[in-house]
């Protein structure tokens, strides 16, 4: 598996990179001071110009000033990050906080300031009572780190300014959703080859012993380690069925997996199977496609709310959701059977079909935008785009959903031009999916 639950937690934390940079800075400060102490003043002047070799008292003052300045910049950086987090939570969606926190660029910039502060402080403590007159390596590194810190701060302001722009945020969320689809596709597709052989387990199915694996903690099913799980299943010669979907909320004692095994050779360690299904207190977008779509839906709902009234942002979100659904509709992994290296079916998973994701993406928008012609027409337009790029076997699903969207609009607020606008999109969907608009819909 490309990304594990531990890696995802590390990626979303603010402590990892600053701690790593801090450790490197401590080592670098100790090494730099020892190098300076090992070189005499005459040796330094033969290596570098005398103008670049300050006296030790000046270096101590420089390090003291840089330590204070770097700590101030670190505080400002923390404040900037907190402002952005508040903005994301209040204006967009609390779910989008994970995306900003997990942004490596923000983590690296924060780590640069922490590393610079640690370097200056450690070097200052070693040189506050200098034993020689001239130093070179320590002040040069301190100056370089300070310059890098200033450049990083300017970049942070520019980066944050782009992050809080709603269109850039929507684009990022769309790309992450598509990335989630691709990762899940790669995780599952290797166990879903087209041609398979008939297979039955080495034990009699009628005498097979059934067992269940339950959850030990409540939370959301955020990740399934398919590779490790399939290896365990094949090695123990059992068949397993998933009882939950990715993204489901489970409670303690709920059935997570069911398995069939040979009663003469029972599985002795079921905890290893439980460890392959990661349950956490928060939903994550590592494999949970619905959660990634939900982020865009929440931004969309805020945009169409009376307090915000930003239909253009809402339409942009709808278009991007359509892009995600087009990618999703063209994936072939929506099958429950997974096979091992011997081309034998071992694992049956629970997969949502395309109609489920279609409904989850738009049912709230249908409800809250049932009097907004621009929102409803945008949904129908996106359904038309999906119909034009999705396999023909999804056309019936798309048409039924188009009927559902159209019938949910409040016809009492429709003016003639609005009605023509809506029905124009509906007729195009009907033509692309091979259906006809019913007389009842015409008369609505």
Image (tube, grey):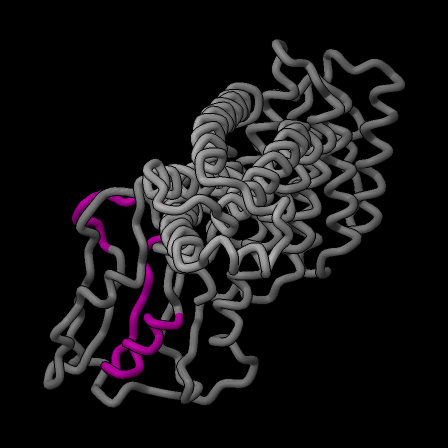
Which residues are the magenta region?
227-255
Q: Is residue 78 magenta?
A: no
Please, is residue 99 above or below residue 355 in the view? above
The number of discs equals 0
- Judge whether residue 11 can be spotted in this image: yes
Image quarter (top left, top right, bottom left or bottom right) of the N terminus: bottom left
- Name the residue at 69% across, 52% down: 326
- Compared with 364, 176 (above or below) is below
The structure residue drawn at horizontal position 43% and vertical position 30%, both measured from the top left corner, is 64
Left or right of residue 310: residue 236:
left
The percent coordinates of residue 372 (x first, y second) are 72, 19
Residue extending furthest toward the front: 42
Q: Is residue 293 above or below residue 408?
A: below
Residue 366: percent from left, percent from top: 62, 27
As displayed, is residue 11 above or below residue 72?
A: below
**Quadrant containing the C terminus in the rendered view:** top right
State the image coordinates of residue 199 (x, y, percent, origin top left): 37, 88
Residue 222 appears in the rendering: no
Any magenta on residue 253? Answer: yes
Q: Residue at x 66, y 43 (%)?
A: 400
**Front position in the image: 352 or 430:** 352
Question: Residue 156: x percent and y percent?
Answer: 61, 34
Is 19 situated left or right of 178 in this image? left
At 81% from the left edge and 28% from the top edge, which residue is drawn? 422
Q: Is residue 356 left or right of residue 316?
A: left
Describe residue 138's horizontal placement relative to residue 421 as left or right. left
């Amino acid at each position: 598996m490309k990304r594990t639950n531990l890696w995802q937690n590390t990626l979303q934390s603010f402590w990892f990179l600053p701690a790593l940079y801090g450790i490197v800075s401590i080592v670098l400060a100790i090494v730099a001071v020892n190098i300076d102490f090992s070189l005499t003043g005459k040796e330094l002047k033969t290596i570098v110009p005398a103008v670049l070799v300050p006296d030790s008292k000046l270096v101590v003052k420089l390090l003291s000033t840089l330590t204070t300045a770097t700590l101030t910049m670190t505080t400002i950086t923390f404040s900037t990050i907190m402002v952005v987090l508040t903005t994301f939570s209040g204006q967009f969606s609390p779910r989008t906080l994970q995306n900003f926190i997990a942004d490596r660029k923000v983590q690296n910039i924060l780590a640069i300031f922490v590393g610079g502060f640690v370097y200056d402080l450690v070097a200052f403590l070693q040189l506050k009572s200098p034993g020689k007159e001239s130093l070179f390596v320590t002040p040069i590194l301190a100056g370089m780190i300070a310059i890098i810190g200033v450049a990083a701060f300017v970049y942070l302001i520019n980066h944050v300014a782009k992050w809080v722009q709603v269109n850039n945020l929507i684009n990022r969320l769309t790309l992450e959703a598509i990335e989630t689809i691709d990762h899940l596709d790669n995780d599952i597709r290797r166990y879903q080859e087209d041609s398979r052989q008939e297979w039955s387990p080495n034990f009699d199915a009628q005498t097979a012993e059934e067992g269940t694996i339950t959850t030990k903690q409540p939370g959301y099913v955020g990740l399934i380690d398919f590779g490790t799980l399939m290896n365990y299943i094949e090695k123990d010669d059992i068949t397993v069925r998933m009882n939950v979907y990715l993204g489901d909320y489970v409670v303690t004692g709920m059935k997570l997996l069911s398995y069939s095994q040979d009663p003469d050779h029972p599985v002795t360690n079921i905890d290893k199977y439980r460890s392959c299904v990661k349950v956490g207190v928060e939903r994550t977008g590592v494999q949970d496609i619905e959660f990634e779509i939900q982020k865009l839906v929440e931004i969309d709902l805020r945009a169409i709310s009376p307090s915000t009234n930003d239909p253009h942002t809402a339409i942009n979100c709808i278009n991007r959701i359509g892009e995600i659904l087009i990618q999703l509709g063209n994936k072939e992994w929506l099958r429950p059977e997974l096979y091992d290296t011997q081309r034998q079916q071992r694992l049956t998973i629970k997969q949502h079909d395309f109609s489920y994701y279609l409904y989850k993406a738009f049912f709230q928008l249908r409800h809250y935008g049932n009097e907004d012609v621009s929102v409803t027409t945008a949904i129908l337009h996106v359904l038309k785009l999906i119909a034009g790029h999705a396999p023909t076997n999804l056309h019936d699903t798309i048409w039924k959903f188009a009927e559902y969207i159209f019938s949910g609009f409040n016809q009492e607020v429709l003016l003639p031009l609005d009605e023509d606008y809506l029905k124009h999109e509906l007729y195009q969907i009907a033509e692309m999916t091979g259906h006809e608009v019913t007389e009842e819909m015409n008369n609505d």
